[in-house]
Amino acid sequence: MALSRRTFSALAGSAALGLALGGSGGPGAPSAYAARSVPTGPAPAPPSADGRPHTIGYDRYSLLVDGRRLVVWSGEMHPFRLPSPSLWRDVLQKMRAHGFNAVSIYVAWNYHSPAPGTYDFTGVRDLDLFLRTAAETGLYVILRPGPYINAEVDGGGFPGWLTAAKGTARTDDPAYLAHVDEWLTQVNLIARRHQFTQGTGTVLLYQIENEYDAHPGDATGRAYMAHLYKKVRADGIDVPLFHNDKGRNGYWTPGSFDTGGEKGGWLYGFDGYPSPSQTPPDWGTFGPGGAKGGASASPSTPGFVPEFGGGWFDPWGGAWFDGKGYAEARRTRDAAYERRFYLTNLANGLTLHNVYMTFGGTSWGWLPAPVVYTSYDYGAAIDEARNVTDKIAPLHQLGHLLQRVPDFAKLDRAADVHAEGLKVYHLANPDTGAHVYVARNDGADAVTADLPTDAGRVRITVPGRDARLLTTGLKLGARTLKYATAEPVMCVTAARQDIAVFSGRHGDMAELVLKCPVGPNVMRLDPEAAWVLDDDSLHVNVPLGQGGLTRVLVQKGETDTPLLLLFADDATAVRLFPYDTPSGTLLVYGPALLRHAEVRGNEVHLTGDVTETTSIEVWGPRGTDTLVWNGRTLPTRVTLSGSLMTTGLLPAVPEVRLPELGGWRMRTENPEAGPSFDDSHWTVAYRTTSFSTTPVPDGQPVLFADDYGFHYGDVWYRGSFTDATGLEEVSLAYSTGTQGLLMAWLDGEPLGTHRMPVPDRTTTIRKGTWADTAVFPIRAALRSPGRHVLSVLVRRMQHDEDGRALDTHKAARGLTAASFKGGSPKVSWRIQGAAAPDPVRGPMNNGGLYGEREGWHLPDFPDHDWEKASFPRAARYQGVTWYRTTFRLSVPADIDASVGLTLQDDPYRAYRAQIFLNGWNLGQYINNVGPQHTFVLPNGILRTRGANTLALAVLSEFTTLSGPGSVRLTLLGRATGGLPVTPV
Ligand code: GAL
C-alpha cells in the first residue's frame, strides 16, 4: 500500500516508518453468522435503584438487560471480610472506577446466624446496607447466599450450630432443608427488596449452592437443587438464577433438574482456577465442544464464568507461595497473567465474567476455614489494605472496553489466522463488522510477528507469557478504525467530541490507522505523536508512556464531530476514568481514583483520591467551565482538546506518622489449670451420642465442643477423678482444624503441649481435619491418691469446609477421648467455651479463654493494676498471657491511611497471639509458622482520629521462650481523599 503523504508530522526517526501495512483484504470472509434479532447497540447505562421495572433476559451471546446486550465484568468481594461498612463503599468505588460493572458477593450463613432461628443483619452484617451501597455506586450485584458457599470460611459457611444438628447437609434430607429454608427466607427478605427487575436495587443474578458436584445426576442432587430453586422463587426472587459448576462438567445446565417451569430463567456457569504455568484453556467458542466442553455444555445460555481466578489462597505456613505470602501470589498471577487468561476467556465467547477475588480482605476472628490464615488478600488486584495494585491495568482496560464498546457483546468465531510463534483467536461481530484478534504468547520470550488481519498484515510484538488484543473495523464514534496495534480501552462522547482511548505496555510503539475517506485536520497535542495521512487513512504512531497521556485531535473530514485519540501506557490508562452523569459522560484524567462525579450547572464536582503529584484534566459536558475537586474549586484552563485542566499541580499525599507502641501492661491467666478453680457453672459433658462424623469413643462421654454449643475459638476441659497412684501416662485424643493445639495440666502442673504439624504442599495442604493423640507422662510426684484435676485447653481452630458434600464440617472439634496408662480412673468432665456471643462483634469474635470470658479484650477493661511490660519479651510459660496498650492516632480527616500491625520475633519461638483492636479479633499470629506478620486494622474499627486499645492474647508453650518480640504499627497505604468513615 503506497503512502501518498499529504501531511506529515515529523518526529525524530519518524515512527511512521514502522508502519507495517500488509496486503489488503484478509484471510477471507468469516463464516455465516447467527440470527441477528438483537442488533449490537450501546450497553445500558450504569444501574441504580431507579424505580423502574427492568427485564433481564439472555441469548447465547450475552445477557439482555431491557433488551440491550450487557457484558458482565464483575469482581468478587466479601462484605464479611471487611468489617467496616464505610469501607465497602471505598472498595466498590474503586471497582467501579476501574472498569467493573458488577460485584459478586457470597453471603455467609454462619456470619449471620449464631443459633438456629436467630439471624442478625445489623452492623457489620447489614446486607441491606451493602446492597444499597452497591446500587448507589452503580454496580450490579451477583448474590451468592449458598446455603453452602465454601469460600475458605469456617464450615464453608455452614453455621457452627449446624455441625451439631441432625440431617445430611447438601442433600435433600428434610432435616437439613428445614434449616436451609429458614436461612433462605431471611436472606431473601432482604434480597428481594434490591432486585434490578423491580427497580429497587441492582441485584442482577442469584446463585444457588456452590460448586455442587457430589450428586450431579442422581435423584438426591436433583431433588436438592429443585428444592433450592423453588424456595428462592417462592421467596419472590425473579432475577435469573444460576449455579457455578465446579469444573467444565456440564453439571446443572438448563433442564438438568426440575425448576417447575422457568420464570426468571436459569443460567449455566462454570468456575476456573488455572495455574499460571498452564496454557490458558479454551472453555468456550474455541473449546473441544460437547457436553463437557465448558460454555458449549449449554449452547442456549451465554458463556458464564462465575469464578475465574484472580489470585489464590495460602495456608498456614505459606506452602502455596513458598512462605512468601500473597506478594508472591500477586507476582505469579500478575497483570500479564490476567491478560493472557481473561482475553482467552473473552475470545472464547464468555460474556459473564467474575474475578475471584478482586478484593480479598480479611478472614477476621474465627472466620477462616482450616485451609487459610487470617489474611485473605488472595494476591487480588485490590490488596487487603485497599490499595489498587498494578494488576488493575488489564481489568480497567477490559472492563471499560466491554461496557463502552458494544461490539464485544456479540462475537462469533471467524476464519482462523496464524501468526508465527503466537496463538491467535479471531472473532467478528456480525452486526458491526468489527474484527477482534487476541494474540497470545505462551513462550517465555517476546515474539514479533505479522498478523494477517482483515485490514491487512499488522506487525505486532507480544511479550513473553502475555497477550494482546487487536481490533479492526471498530466504530470510534462517528469514525471507523482500520486497525490498531494498541488495545482499545474505551470510546466515549464528552466535551462535544468522540474520545477514543488506546493503551499498551510501557515503551510499546502504538500504531493506529483510522479510515478517513475525506481528509481531516489533524493536530497532535503532545509531541510524542507522529501522524501521516494517505489516500483514505490517518496513520498515527505513539511511543507509549513517554509523556503520560498523548493526545491527537482529528477534526473535520467526513464528519463535523471531532475525534480525540488518547494513547496511554498501562500506568497512565488506569488514571483515566469515564463517568456517566445525567448531564452527560465525563472523562477524567490524572488522579489515582475518581470516586464520584456530578455536574451542577457549569460546575463539575469530582471526588476522589490523589497519591502522587498530579494535574487533573476533565472532558465534561457542554457548558461546564469550573472544576471542583473534593469540595475545592481549582483554577483551570481550557485546553486545545476541549478539556478543563488544572493550572497547578495537586500535591502528593503527605507523610503519615504512626506512633511507637509502648506502655504495655500484662497479665497471665489460665486459672482453669489450677486444682481449686471453681468450674461448678461449666457445662457437664453428659452426652453419649452426637451427629458428628467423628465416632464417640466407647465408654466415654461426648467431649466434642460443638455438641455443647461451643462453636468458635478455644475450649477448656476440666476432668476430675480420684486416685492417680498408678498412673504413668495420659493420652488425650483431639481433633482440630489446621494448626490446632492442645495443652494439659495435672493439678496445675504443666504436662505439656501438642500441636498439629504445619501443612505441606503435597499431601496435607487440603486436609481440613487434623486428629491426633497427645501422650504426656505423669511425673511420680503427681501420682497420689485423692482428688485430681486434669485441665486441658484445646485451640480447636475451625470447622472443615464440606466441599465434597460428605458432612466434613461435622468432624469433631476439641478433645475427643482420654485414656491412661497404669490405671483407668473414671473422669467426670466439664467443658467451657466462649461466653455468650458478643452482640456487636458476633459469635466468631471470641473463644473461651479466661480473658475473653472476662472481657480483657474490650477497650474499657480496667487494666491499671496489671504489671508493666515492654517488648521484646522472652518468657517461658505454658498458657495464656495478655498484653494491653492504648495508642492515639491523629490522621488528618482528608487522608485515607491504611494501617496494619506487624509482629516479628525469632521464628523458633513457639507461641501465637490473637490480636484484638478495640475488642475486635482481627486475627491470629503464629510466630513459628507464619507466613503472616502484618495484620490489617480496618478504619472504622481503628480510630484514625482518636484513642485505640490493643490487646494481645498470647498462647505459649513451655518448650521455647515466648515473645512478643517487636510489635509496631505499619503504614500500608495512604491517599489524599478517601471517604468519611463511621466508627463501627
Ligand atoms: C472455588 C469455590 C470458592 C473458593 C475458591 C477458592 O472452588 O467456589 O468458594 O473456595 O474455590 O478460593
Image (cartoon, rainbow, N blue to C red):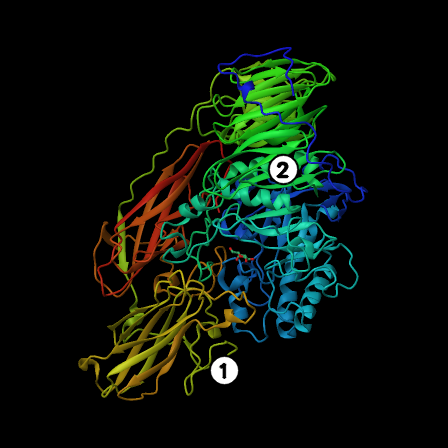
Q: For mark 2, does the 10 Å Cα neighbourhood hold few (<14), some (14 to 19), or many (20 or more) residues?
A: many
First-in-chain label (2 vs 1): 2
Q: Is residue 556 left or right of residue 111?
A: right
Helix, strand, or loop for circle 2?
strand
Q: Nearer the viewer, residue 810 or 352?
A: 352
Q: Quadrant of residue 264?
A: bottom right
Residue 946 image-quadrant placement: top left
Asked whether disc 2 touches disc 1, contact meaning CB atoms under 8 Å apart, the reply is no
Residue 644 shows up from this direction:
yes
Q: Amino acid at mark 2?
A: Tyr
Q: Nearer the viewer, residue 50 or 155?
A: 155
- Expressed as whole percent of the image width and height from the top left, the position of residue 517 reads 73, 18
Q: Helix, strand, or loop for circle 1? A: loop
Specify the farthest residue to the left: 781
Please state if 689 lies on the left or on the right of 497 as rendered. left
Q: Which residue is mark 1?
A: 689
Residue 437 badge: 2
Image height check: is 883 above or below 640?
below
Q: Position of residue 734 (x, y in %)?
A: 38, 74
Q: Nearer the viewer, mark 2 or mark 1?
A: 2
Residue 260 circle label: none
Residue 501 sits in quarter: top right
Which is more toward the observer, 960 or 634?
A: 960
